[in-house]
Amino acid sequence: MDVTLPADLRKQVEQELASGRYGSRDELIEQAVRQFFDERRRGEQRLDALRRIGQAVDQAGLYERVLTPRSGPCSSRSAVNEAGDFTILWGSDSGARAVETPEH
């Protein structure tokens, strides 16, 4: 496989090789590609975990479902009224209360 890099990345690769941290260009590129895939996998795992947390919060009814003028029904801790004010709601279906309304 041939890899063509822009001049700025080629310069960085040459600097890394000169530092002695890597034995060859192939070793450096291999490590970079592995790190790229590892980072992407960890990011996907974090997103999956956040989705599971969101689903658990939905199922537990920890925040109220609200209707916003722009998006229709949604699960949210915030709502936008007709004047465009942003209000953060917190609580269950039976006890949601406004806790913050930023000034315009």
Image (cartoon, rainbow, N blue to C red):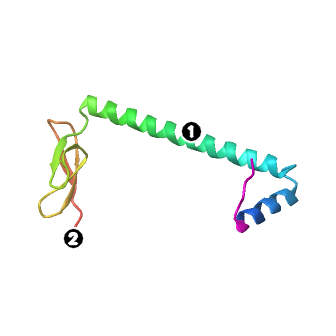
Q: Is residue 92 above or below residue 102?
A: above
Query: Depth check: 102 or 30 in front?
Result: 30
Count of numbered badges drawn on the protein: 2
Above or below 33: residue 51? above
x, y (%) of residue 75? 24, 41
Residue holding disc 1: 41
* Residue type marked 1: Arg
Residue 46 in the image, given as x and y percentages of width and height: 49, 39
The CA span between labels 1 and 2 is 41 Å
* Among the 4 quarters of the image, the one containing residue 30: top right
Residue picked out by circle 2: 104
Residues drawn in magenta: 1-8
Tell me what residue is drawn at x 16 percent, y 36 percent.
93
Between marks 1 and 2 in the image, the one whose residue lies nearer the viewer: 1
Q: Amino acid at mark 2?
A: His
Secondary structure of residue under mark 2: loop
Predominant SS of the magenta segment: loop
Q: Residue at x 82, y 52 (%)?
A: 25
* Element assignment for label 1: helix
63 sits left or right of 18 in the view: left
Within 10 Å of the Cα at label 1, are there few (<14), some (14-19), or many (20+) other Cα atoms? few
